[in-house]
Amino acid sequence: MRDNTLKYLLVMPAVLVVFATAIWPLIEAARLSFTVGRLNRPGSLDQYLGWENYTWAFFEEPAFWNSVWVTGVYTLLTVGLTTVCALGLALLLAPGGRLRSSAQTLLILPFAMSPALIGVSFRFMFNPEFGLFDAFFGVMIPPLADVSWLADPNLAFAVVVMADVWGWIPFLTLVLIGGLASVPRDTIEAAQVDGASGWRVFKDVTLPQLAPVLAVVIILKSIFSLKTFDQVFMLTNGGPGTATQTLSHYIYFNGMKYGQIGYSASVAWLMVIPMIFLTYAYAKFVFRKA
Amino acid sequence: MTGKQKKQLWHALHTALILIAMFVMLVPILWIFLAAFKSHVDVYQLKLFFTPTLENFGVVFDDPYRLGEKLFNSTIVAFFTVLFAIPIATLAAYSFSRFSLRGETLMLVTILATQFVPAVVIILPFFVMFRDIGLLDTRVGLILVNLAIVMPFAIWMIKGFIDGIPMDTEEAAMVDGSSRLQVIRNIVLPMAAPGLLTSAIFCFIIAWNEFLFALILTNKEAVTLPIGLALFKGEEGDLWNLLSAAGIIIMAPMFVLALMIRKYFVQGMTMGAVR
Amino acid sequence: MRKRTFLASAAMAATLALAPIATLADGHLADYNLLPGKPFEGTKLNILSVVTPQFDGLMLRDDEFTELTGIETEWTFIPFGSLQEKINAEGIAANGTFDVVNYLDSWGPPNAHWLKRIDELMARDGISMDRYPAAFARSAQFQGETLGFPLRAHPQLMFYRKDLIAEPPTSWEEIIEVGKALKESNPDIAPLALYYNNDGNRQNLFIWINFLWAAGADIFNEDGSAAWASEAGLQATKDYVELHTVHGVTNPNSVAFNEQDARQSFMQGNSAMMPVWWWAYSGFYNPDSSTLTKDQVGFAGMPSYKGTTKTYAISMPFSISEYSENQDAAWEFLKWLSNPEMDKANAIEREVGGKSIVNNVVTHISSLQDADVNAANDGIQSAAWASLEQSDIMPQIAEWPEIGDILSAAIAEAASGGDVEALMTEAAERADKVLRRAGVLQ
C-alpha cells in the first residue's frame, strides 16, 4: 500500500474514536442546551426553547454567577499558589543528591492519588472534632483553635484550595525541576562570578530561561483548575451554602440531581468557551517545540 | 561567621526545608494509612498509638460494601480502556510522527483540545444515549467514555516516544524491500515497546482514578473503586476507618505503577509541551 | 368510586372465604393476605434496600416468604449515602433491574412516574394505610395515591445525657437556659449538637422545620409559592439560627456538622443533647461505636417552640417499580414484608438466624403501642408515638430537590453568620422563580 493512503488509514481509528468520544458529545450537548431537557419529562429532550437556558443562567440565576465567581477565584488561587510553592520546591530539590532525589521519587505519590480520594482525606484531616490538620492549625495558630474549617465559607474555600494545591504541587515541581535542568549552568556561573546575589541570579537568569516551561504549566494548571469537580464533590459537596460550588459541580447538580439536562448542557457549553482560549494558548507552546 | 560555617548552616537549612516539605506532602497519606488500621472507636481520637487491626480490610470486602466487585470493575475497565487505546493511539502516533498529513496540525490540536473539554460536558450526551441503548451501568459503556480521556494523552505521549526513534533503521529496511506495515511491526514496535508500556501504565492510572464518568454512569453492576468511596457514608456517617482501608486499596497499586514510570509522568501529562 | 369499593369488598370476601383452607395448608398465608396456591412460584425478585440492621432482620426472615409463595428474593443493600443516586439512576435507566425499591420519602415525588400505585391492590387485599401513623402514611403517598409502605420511618426525639441533665428540657427556651447552665458547670462538653450544614439530604431543615411549623408558618403557601419568608417564618428561622450564633448553646462545630457528625459528637461525649431520629438510640450506647453507656443516654419528646410542638417525621418506603416484570409477585412480597407481626418481632427478637440484630424501629400503630415492643426497647416507642401525634412530613413535590437545596443552603449560610432575613427572602424569591420556570407556579 502506498504511504500516501496508509498514513491516513493509520490515523483513521484514532480520529474516529476522538470524534465519537469528544466531538460528537460536544455537538450533542450544544443541541441539548436549546431544549427543555428535563429527565423526568418524557420527550422534553427534543422540545426546543431557543436561548432560554442561556438567558436563565445569565439573568435569572444568581447561583450560576456564584459558581462562576467561585471557579474564577479558585483557579487564580490554585494556579498562583501551586506555581509559587512548586517553584520553591523545585529550586530546593533541583541540585540533586541522595536526599533530594529520593524526595523527588516520593513526590510522585500524591500525584498518583485519585482526586476523589484527596478530597476524602482532606475532609478527614479537617474534621472539626478529630481532624489532624484541624488540631495542628489549632496549636500553631491559636486563634484558629476553635474554628470549624469546613463550616466557615471562606475557610472551607481555603481547605478546598489547599487540597488542590497539595495534590498538584508534585507534578508542577517535577516539571519545573526538568525545566531548571535545561538552564545552562555556565550562564548562572557567569552571573555569579560577576557578583550577582542569589536573588538577582534567579530573577535575571533562571526565571527568564524558565519562562516557557512556567507558561506551559500555568496554562495546564488553569485548565485543570477550571474543570475541578472530584475533590469538591468529596470534600465539601459545594458547601457550606454554595461557597465552594464550582461550575462543574453546579452543572452536575443541575443535570443529575435536579434532572435538568438541557439547562446544565447550556452552562457546560459556557464553560467550554474559556477552554478554547486556553487550549489555543497551550497549543502554541506545543507546536513551538515541535 | 566564616564562609564555611555559613555554607554549613545554609546546607542544614536546606535539608530541614526539604524534610518539612516531604513531611507536608506525605502526612495526609500516612494519616489515611494509620486510620485504615484503627478500630471504629480509635478513629475518632487523635491517637498515634493504638492496637492495629486488619479487621477493616475484611469488612470492606464483605457485604454490603463488596469492594472486591468494585476492584474487579476498576481493573477490567482500566485494562480494556488501555487495551483499546494503545494500539489505536500507536498507529495514529506513528503516522503523525513520520508523515506529514493534510490538516495534521488541526488534527493534533483537536486531539489535544478534547482533553481540555470539561468531562461534565462530554458526559451529559453519553448519559442520555446510554440510557436509550441500555449501556448505563455497564463496564462496556464506561470503557467507551474512558477512551475520551485517555486517547489524547496516549497519542501525544506515544508520538513523543516514536519521534525519539531514529528513522535510519526503518529506511534501511524499506530499501531491503520491507513494506511499511512490516517496518512498523518488526522495527518500530519493538523499539517503542518501553514507551508503549509507559504510556499504557500512564493511561491505566488515569482510567483507574477517573471519577465523574463512573459517578454518573454506574449504579450497581459497574461501580468502580473511586465511586465505591461514597459507599462508606452510611446512616452512621462517614466510616473513616473503612474509607481509609478502601483508600489504601485504591492508591497502593497506583503508587507502584507510578513509581515504575515516574520519569515519564511529566512528559505524559504535558502532552509534548515539556520534554 | 362505588364500583371500585364493591369490587374490592368482593375480592376481600373471596380472600376471607379462602382463608381457612389456606391457613390449614400454609401456616401464615392468610395472616399476611398472601394469594394461595403459589401462583408466582419460581419468580425471583430483586430488592434494593438501604443498609440497616432493621432490614437485615427482615431479610434473614424471608425464607418464610419463599416457603409460602415459592418466590425467591435477592436483596441488594446500598448504604444510605449512595442510595439517592441509585434511585434516580434506576428511574432513568428504566430497565427494571429492581422489582422492589426502598427510598427516602422526599425522593418519592421526583420518581413518582415509575413507582406503582398500590391503592387498588390494597383495597383488594384488605390493607389500609390507617395501620400507620398519619405522617408515616402520608410520606408514602403522592397526590392522594399510595406509592408504597413506610417500612422504616422515624419520629424525632430529644436525646440527652442523663448523667449531666436531670430533667430533659421541654421547650427550646428552656434548652437555652439549661445549656447556659451546663456550659458553666461542664465547660468541656457542648450543650447541644445541632447540624446546620447543607451537605447531605438537606438535614439542616429537620430541626428548623419544628420551629417553622410551631410558629404557624410553612414552607409553601396554598398556591405553591414559597412561604418561609413570612414574618413568623423569619422569626422562627432567626430563633433556630440564634441557638448557635447568639446563645452559643450549640456545639461550636454545629455549622460544619451534618446529622452524622452531630451524632458522632454525642457518642464521643462532646455534646450533651441532640435532637435526632429515634433509630439512633441503640447506636448511642453500642460499645463498638460509642463511648457512652446505656445509663447515660436518655430520651424525651421534642421541645416546644413558643408553646407548640410540631415535629418532623421521615420515612423510607418500599415501593414496586413500574418497570418490573414481576409486579404481582412484588406485591405479594410487600404484603409479607409489611405485616404487623414481623414489624413487632423485628424490634423484640435480638437474634435472627444466628445474627445479632438490634433495632427499635417499628411503623405500625399497633406495634408502637405494643407492651412487649416497648418493654424490649426501654419504652422508646411510646415516646415516639407521642412525638408522632403532632408531626408532619416535607412537602411532596417533584421539584423538591432543587427547592430544598436552595432553602438548605440559605439556612447554612445564615448559621455561619449571614443575615437571616436577606438570605431567606432571597431564597424564597429564587424558589418561586424556579417553580415558575418548572410550570408549577403561575
Image: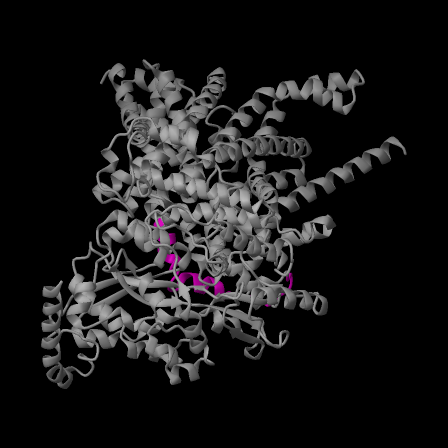
Residue B202's place in the image compared with C125, above or below, is: above
Instruction: From the viewer's side, name the closer residue of C218 and C181.
Output: C218
Instruction: From the viewer's side, name the closer residue of C442 and B263.
Output: C442
Residue A255: horizontal and vertical position, in percent? Answer: 36, 40
Residue C41 inside the magenta-drawn segment: no
Classify residue C69 as left or right of residue B103: left
Number of disc labels: 0
> Magenta residues, as a range?
B47-73
Residue C1's place in the image compared with A117, above or below, is: below
Residue A93: horizontal and vertical position, in percent? Answer: 66, 34
For the N terminus of chain C, the quadrant is bottom left
For the C terminus of chain C, the quadrant is top left
Residue A38: horizontal and vertical position, in percent? Answer: 29, 40
| Picture quadrant of residue A56 | top left
Q: Residue furthest right?
A: B1
Q: Is residue C8 visible?
A: yes
